[in-house]
């Protein structure tokens, strides 16, 4: 049970409540669990985030000249990765990627810190909408559905489809 894995989250998993629900079955685990993970703003270049048709969640696909803002998560265990793979399901493939961490330093001379990680890439491009998925809209309108009754997401399709 190592905590050496990392991942780049660009959608519903950017919400700590969803991440903790998926990985631990509760929206607000004990502080000792929270302390195992770090979440740092980051950018995935040469990709674009789209809405998935009829769903609350987004997809990322390779797209030249585009970039996706998200979260670089550390401290992920083998068990976390297994739960994340199950959560993402067959619509996505976990692939290696590089992300650029957001700098705390406002100076332009600071070198951007690039990290190797993994990202879930969407496989079915025909299921994508042209417009980008909006994290704030998700938080305001759909987050409660993704964390109600401490869901474990064993059957994501029952909770993810928009009404």
Image (tube, rainbow, N blue to C red):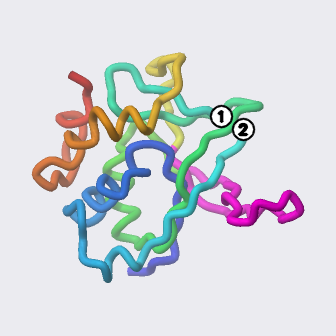
The residue under the point 48% across, 21% down is 128
**Dot label at residue 62:** 1
Q: Which residue is mark 2?
A: 46
Residue 54: assigned label: none
Q: Are marks 2 and 1 in contact (CB under 8 Å)?
A: yes
> Crowdedness of circle 2 by 10 Å Cα count: few (<14), some, many (20+)?
few
Please give left or right for residue 15 compared with residue 129 in the image: left
Q: Is residue 160 left or right of residue 36?
A: left
Using the image as rendered, state which of residue 82 and residue 117 is in the foreground. 117
Q: Quadrant of residue 23?
A: bottom left
Residue 33 position in % (x across, y down): 32, 77
Secondary structure beneath dot 2 equals strand
Q: Residue at x 84, y 65 (%)?
A: 110
Q: Quadrant of the C terminus?
A: top left
Magenta residue check for 98: yes
Residue closest to the far front: 106
What's drawn in magenta, residue-wise?
Answer: 95-120
Residue 101 position in % (x across, y down): 67, 60
Q: Residue at x 32, y 51 (%)?
A: 86
Query: Does residue 113 appear to the left or right of 123 in the view shown?
Result: right
């Amino acid at each position: 049970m190592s905590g050496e894995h990392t991942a780049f989250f660009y959608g519903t998993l950017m919400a700590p409540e969803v991440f903790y629900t998926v990985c631990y079955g509760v929206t607000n685990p004990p502080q000792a669990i929270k302390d195992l993970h770090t979440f740092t703003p980051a950018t995935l270049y040469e990709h674009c985030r789209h809405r998935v048709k009829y769903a609350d969640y987004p997809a990322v696909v390779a797209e030249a000249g585009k970039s996706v803002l998200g979260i670089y998560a550390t401290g992920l265990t083998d068990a976390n990765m297994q739960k994340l793979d199950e959560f993402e399901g067959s619509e996505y493939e976990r692939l290696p990627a590089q992300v650029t961490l957001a700098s705390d330093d406002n100076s332009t001379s600071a070198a951007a810190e690039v990290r190797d990680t993994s990202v879930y890439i969407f496989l079915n491009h025909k299921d994508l909408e042209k417009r980008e998925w909006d994290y704030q809209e998700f938080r305001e309108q759909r987050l409660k559905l993704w964390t109600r009754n401490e869901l474990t997401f064993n059957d994501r399709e029952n909770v993810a489809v928009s009404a």
